[in-house]
Image (tube, helix red, strand yellow):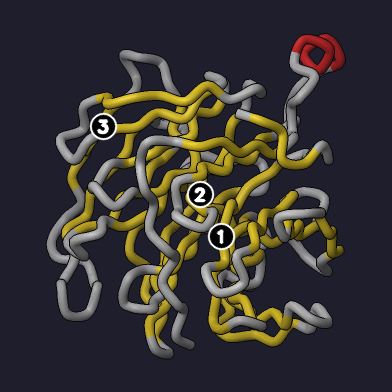
Amino acid sequence: MEILDHTTCELGEGAFWHPERSEFFWFDILNRRLFCHDGQKTTMRDLPALFSAAGWMDRDTLVLSGEEGLFRYEIANGALSPIMFIETDNAVTRSNDGRTDPWGGFWASTMGRKAEAGAGSIYRYYRGQLQRLHGGISIPNAICFDAERERAYFADSARQVVWRQALDPETGWPCGEAEAFIDFNEADLVPDGAVTDAAGNLWIAHWGARMVGCYGPDGRSVASVAVPASQASCPAFGGADFRTLYVTSAREGMDASSLVADPHAGKTFFGPVEARGLPAPRFIA
């Protein structure tokens, strides 16, 4: 992979390709920044709070998931307006991974600001309704959806497990209990952000392993892509044909000697892959 942007993020996350603007967005969560690369240059915008994930409402408007919930974000001027507050009465938590689902809903997660065990949850917002789907999660990640609109995936990075959740094909609400899909404890891999491709494969950024792994619908390893930084955090497909993989990374928790050994930590990368991704669905408020 090549370096897309040399800016070093403390916690680069929320990789997202806007299909109408053909622009790539990502966050530095801890430094409260939103970045955008338009194919030529990167722009950086300061944010008034911690934000960690995004989706698109139209060409000029994003939905952002932040420490107080979901917000409408005007790209032109940075104006924010609330859509739905989430856990505003809980000072322990902040937002983490999130993604728009194929029905136009948004799955947003929370976690402890100090990664407190079991403090996190996953919520779904859909057409004005907010529902808590899963609780007791330490570091929620890998939220994504298959192309067939049959299931969702999510992980607890602290437990090193990815779960699979059956969904109602008409509404996108969960059906039954989630089931363990991939247990990475034996391989000692940590699942972070994830995205699916058009063939139903799951692409997972592995924190601490310098790689994005690709796993088939049966959970078996299919391929891997090396990342030039140890703490790969979140992948996204983009480009004109959705055959470019973008990956964020982080410097969080690294001491001086680790940073010397990992000079590209926190930078953002891209490169071509054999797989074809899917455009992110439009969020419907």
Q: Residue drawn at (80%, 19%), measured in percent from left and top?
A: 263
Q: Identity of the amino acid at label 2? A: Ala
Q: Residue at x 35, y 14 (%)?
A: 187
Residue 265: x and y, percent?
A: 74, 27
Q: Identify which residue, 1 or 266, lies in the foreground.
A: 1
Q: Is disc 2 placed on a helix, strand or loop?
A: strand
Residue 74: name its quadrant. Answer: bottom right
Q: Are marks 2 and 3 in contact (CB under 8 Å)?
A: no
Identified by mark 3, the residue type is Ile
Provide the residue designation for mark 1.
17
Q: Decide which of tag 1 and tag 3 comes sooner along the chain.
A: 1
| Pointer 1 with pointer 3, Cβ within 8 A | no
Up the image or down, 204 lies above or below 60; here it is above
Residue 156 placement (x, y as % from top left): 41, 40
Q: Is residue 260 above or below residue 87?
A: above
Q: x and y percent of residue 180 in the render?
A: 21, 39
Q: Nearer the viewer, residue 165 or 15?
A: 15
Mark 1 and mark 2 lie on one chain; the one further toward the N terminus is: 1
Residue at the (26%, 32%) spot, across then down: 182
Mark 1 and mark 2 residues within 8 Å of each other at the beta carbon: yes
Q: Which residue is mark 2?
A: 236
- Disc 2 or disc 3, which is closer to the eye? 2
Check the picture and name the quadrant holding the N terminus.
top right
Examine the rendering and report whether any part of residue 120 can be seen.
yes
Which mark, by number, is residue 182?
3
The secondary structure type at the circle numbered 1 is strand
